[in-house]
Image (spheres, rainbow, N blue to C red):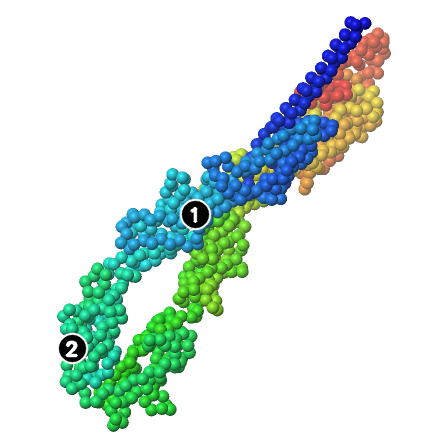
């Protein structure tokens, strides 16, 4: 009892232990599966369309998708990366979603030196019993979908005019391209170098490219102070993409010029009673330099006495000399003023001003201006749009001489102005314009109003007029017609030309933007600022050879003005089209015996290219010994007449080669089928000779086939259909034999009562058109029980040869008329006489020979069964001699 109980407890413990162990190991296995994660890596290119297959998780993990319950796939949580992919829950296939994957947006900091751009996903394989955690990494590869871009539309580079040749200036505002590696910026180039610049590219340690402007010739700012061109950045894609910016090269001034006076000798007349502050003269000095290097200051020479300097004030900036003190009104005097024009680092320019003081008894007139136009500090501003006769100022002239003498008022200076007395008042003068002002022709005018009394005393008033610019000029294209040639199959974004237009207006009114006309195809792009014209796609000359459209140049003034130009783009041909035959293959039907070098047919071939690229030469690859082809028209000809019976079909390969470099070609097959012409008469194969014969037993029953005439015709169709007919007969009873017109089979029509030689002249004719051809043959039938005397038969055949058998050539046409019975059998009387004689002799000896004949009866019957002698025939015509009974050949 105890032992059994202990045994039972022991077994239960073992059972529970196994269960616990099984549960423990099962849980560890579950946790092991959960903790085990697999990783899949896929590579895709950016910009793929929605629905593109990325990869299949189920297939790549070799999962059995036919299990029950089925395997399911799930994305556990929504991440940023989940927006770009979608997962099929039953197959585990990953697809691109509606959000396009842009590598530059997704991974803006990625570069080719780090791990790149990666989309990371967690995929759960469900349900629990199949559970797996799959780490999916999607490597997004870069494509060339971004063009290089400069940080600004205009890049300015300053170059001193004294820069030595081969000096280098870095273009710091280089282009950037978000694409990686070879798809990034690879080179730079200038649209125009003006013969004085070149562009080089240097790569730093970080792999960045910097363009350097190189001076290749001497510069002179005074000759040309600015160069404007386009700098192009090109990436390494296929096709490459381009970025464009305006490069403005400013030649900075160097003080290589000194001031110079416009007049080195100036004479001034001054009356003794001239009031203080009167304007005596203005000196003009100029310096071609720019900026600080062109600043001019005026000063008296140290040789001018201090008292004279105090009397005549010199403005250091403007060069204006004014009367600063009171002069002696009684005595005249001459003052010599030496004026220096000083520039930075220059030897001063010298001008001599001579002032003549004239003694007067009374003072000069006085001029009192009153301005109508806008004025400030003696400077009048007027718009260039002001109409003619626009008033500028009134001038009132007062004479200090109280005796009322008339005063003369004059205008000095050039320009469209006039000074005229005002009709309503005395000593009032009106200054006005005579013509419209034009800012583009002249921006300022300096006028002098001179009042002079009868005594010769005068005084001057100076007026400066500044013309204000208005938007009165439309941009003007450098060319009214731009003709551009570009080869077809060009890469996209190919540079075509740069449009240039100028506007004489100033400031924003003179800035030009470029626009395409409404008739311009959408494939052309025009940079608004630089005027660079490009084509966004590859051109095909065969599709369109010439593009013609308008372009507009518009300024920024108010109101805006514009002008137009015409652009004509001619697409030049490249040998990109091989010749093409109109048909895939050609079949020509030609009657045989066609005359040599007659035209069999024309092979039409085209080539969409132009010029030499579209010139096509034809040649025969096989059969050139029989045929020749005309390259100009493509006409196929035979060198000699062709015989269908020798060869009925010709297969030719014709090659068409264009004149391009490299040459392109195509091949077509030409089949020449010769049509039959009835040029061959039937040829009789059996019987082989007119001297052959056949033994026919007299006991042969009517309807028995005796023999047949066998003939062939080398022609085809109806030209080879043969008809047989008997045209002449000799021997025996007429109509004993007949011939089948279709088969040539000769049959016995009636019982044979006469022995001897029967001769039948058989005509073998075809059904050709326009006239059938024929041949004749003599069929000899020897009617007898046996051939006992061949020499006799031979003599009969020799005599039969005298029968007029048609022996004319086949081309003569037809047989002669059938002769009469007497002509066919000229020996008939002789034969009758011989027959009567033989019958008499036979009746005499018949009794004597009766006994002998009875004994030899059996022997005689055996002789009737003699073997037939075959007629000699060709080896391949032996079958024709069927049903022959006994044939003997001579």
User: Between residues 577 and 501, which one lies in front from this camera angle?
Assistant: 501
Residue 452 falls left or right of residue 659: left
Relative to 651, is 443 above or below?
A: below
Where the C terminus falls, by quadrant? top right
The 10 Å Cα crowd at callout 2, few under 14, some 14 to 19, many 20 or more, is some
Q: Which residue is mark 2?
A: 335
Q: Which mark is residue 175?
A: 1
Percent from the top left, x then y, of residue 567? Answer: 47, 58
User: Between residues 321 and 219, which one lies in front from this camera angle?
Assistant: 321
Q: Is residue 419 visible?
A: no
Q: Quadrant of residue 459?
A: bottom left
User: Between residues 765 and 807, which one lies in front from this camera angle?
Assistant: 765
Question: Which residue is painted at 45% across and 57% down in the image?
Answer: 529
Question: Which residue is painted at 79% across and 13% down in the image?
Answer: 865
Query: Does the CB distance between marks 1 and 2 fall below 8 Å?
Result: no
- The mark lying in front, picked from 1 and 2, is 2
Percent from the top left, x then y, of residue 12? Answer: 76, 12
Percent from the top left, x then y, of residue 23? Answer: 70, 20
Q: Quadrant of residue 137?
A: top right
User: Between residues 722 and 323, which one lies in front from this camera angle?
Assistant: 323
Residue 654 falls left or right of residue 832: left
Relative to 844, is 400 above or below?
A: below
């Amino acid at each position: 009892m105890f032992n059994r109980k202990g045994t039972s407890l022991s077994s239960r413990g073992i059972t529970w232990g196994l269960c616990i162990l099984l549960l423990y190991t099962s849980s560890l296995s579950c946790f092991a599966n959960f903790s085990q994660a697999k990783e899949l890596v896929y590579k895709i290119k950016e910009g793929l369309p929605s629905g593109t297959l990325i990869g299949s998780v189920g297939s790549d993990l070799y999962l059995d998708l036919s299990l029950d319950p089925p395997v399911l796939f799930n994305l556990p949580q929504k991440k940023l990366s989940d927006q770009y992919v979608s997962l099929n829950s039953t197959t585990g296939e990953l697809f691109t979603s509606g959000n396009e994957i842009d590598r530059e947006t997704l991974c803006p900091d990625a570069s080719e030196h780090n791990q790149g751009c990666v989309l990371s996903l967690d995929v759960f394989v469900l349900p629990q019993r199949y559970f797996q955690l799959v780490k999916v990494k999607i490597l997004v590869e870069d494509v060339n979908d971004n063009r290089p871009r400069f940080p600004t539309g205009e890049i300015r580079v300053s170059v001193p005019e004294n820069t030595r040749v081969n000096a280098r200036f870095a273009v710091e505002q280089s282009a950037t391209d978000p694409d990686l590696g070879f798809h990034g910026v690879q080179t730079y180039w200038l649209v125009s170098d003006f013969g004085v610049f070149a562009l080089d590219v240097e790569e730093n340690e970080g792999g960045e490219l910097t363009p350097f402007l190189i001076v290749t010739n001497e510069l002179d700012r005074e000759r040309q102070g600015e160069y404007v061109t386009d700098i192009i950045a090109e990436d390494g894609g296929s096709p490459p993409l381009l970025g464009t910016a305006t490069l403005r090269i400013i030649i900075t001034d160097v003080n290589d010029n000194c001031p110079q006076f416009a007049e080195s000798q100036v004479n001034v007349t001054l009356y003794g009673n001239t009031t203080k502050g009167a304007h005596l003269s203005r000196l003009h000095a100029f310096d071609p330099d720019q900026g600080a290097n062109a600043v001019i200051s005026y000063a008296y020479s140290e040789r001018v006495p201090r008292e004279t300097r105090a009397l005549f004030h010199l403005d250091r900036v403007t060069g204006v000399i004014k009367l600063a003190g009171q002069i002696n009104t009684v005595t005249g005097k001459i003052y010599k003023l030496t004026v220096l024009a000083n520039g930075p680092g220059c030897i001063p320019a010298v001008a001599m001003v001579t002032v003549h003081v004239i003694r007067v008894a009374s003072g000069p007139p006085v001029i009192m201006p009153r301005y109508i136009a806008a004025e400030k500090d003696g400077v009048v501003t007027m718009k260039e749009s002001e109409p003619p006769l626009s008033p500028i100022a009134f001038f009132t002239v007062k004479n200090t001489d109280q005796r009322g003498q008339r005063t003369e008022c004059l205008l000095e200076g050039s320009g469209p102005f006039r000074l005229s007395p005002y009709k309503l008042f005395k000593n009032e003068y009106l200054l006005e314009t005579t013509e419209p002002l034009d800012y583009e022709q002249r921006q300022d005018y300096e006028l002098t109003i001179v009042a002079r009394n009868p005594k010769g005393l005068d005084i001057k008033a100076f007026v400066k007029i500044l013309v204000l610019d208005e938007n009165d000029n439309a941009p003007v294209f450098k060319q009214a017609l731009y003709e551009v040639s570009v080869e077809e199959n060009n890469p996209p974004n190919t540079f075509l030309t740069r449009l240039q237009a100028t506007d004489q207006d100033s400031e924003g009114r003179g800035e030009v933007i470029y626009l395409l006309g409404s008739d311009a195809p959408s494939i052309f792009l025009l940079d608004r600022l630089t005027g660079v014209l490009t084509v966004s796609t590859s051109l095909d000359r065969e599709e369109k050879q010439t593009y013609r459209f308008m372009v507009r140049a518009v300024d920024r003034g108010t109101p805006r003005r514009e002008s137009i130009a015409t652009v004509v783009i001619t697409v030049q041909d490249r040998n990109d089209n091989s010749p093409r035959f109109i048909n895939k293959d050609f079949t020509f039907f030609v009657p045989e015996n066609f005359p040599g070098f007659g035209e069999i047919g024309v092979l039409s071939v085209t080539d969409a290219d132009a010029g030499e690229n579209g010139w096509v030469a034809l040649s025969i690859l096989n059969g050139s010994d029989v045929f020749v082809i005309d390259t100009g028209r493509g006409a196929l000809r035979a060198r000699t007449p062709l015989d269908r019976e020798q060869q009925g079909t010709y297969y030719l390969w014709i090659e068409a080669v264009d004149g391009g470099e490299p040459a392109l070609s195509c091949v077509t097959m030409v089949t020449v089928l010769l049509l039959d012409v009835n040029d061959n008469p039937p040829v009789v194969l059996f019987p082989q000779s007119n001297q052959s014969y056949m033994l026919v037993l007299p006991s042969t029953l009517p309807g028995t086939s005796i023999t047949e005439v066998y003939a062939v015709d080398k022609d085809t169709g109806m030209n080879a259909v043969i008809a047989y007919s008997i045209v002449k007969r000799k021997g025996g009873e007429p109509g004993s034999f007949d011939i089948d017109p279709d088969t040539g089979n000769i049959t016995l029509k009636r019982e044979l009562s006469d022995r001897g030689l029967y001769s039948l002249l058989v005509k073998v004719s075809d059904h050709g058109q326009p006239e059938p051809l024929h041949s004749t043959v003599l069929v000899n039938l020897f009617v007898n029980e046996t051939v006992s005397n061949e020499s006799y038969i031979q003599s009969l055949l020799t005599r039969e040869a005298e029968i007029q058998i048609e022996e004319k050539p086949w081309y003569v046409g037809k047989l002669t008329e059938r002769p009469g019975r007497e002509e066919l059998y000229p020996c008939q009387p002789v034969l009758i006489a011989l027959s009567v004689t033989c019958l008499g002799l036979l009746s005499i000896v018949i009794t004597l020979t009766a006994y002998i004949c009875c004994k030899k009866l059996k022997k005689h019957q055996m002789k009737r069964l003699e073997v037939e002698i075959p007629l000699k025939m060709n080896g391949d015509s032996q079958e024709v001699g069927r049903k022959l009974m006994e044939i003997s050949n001579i």
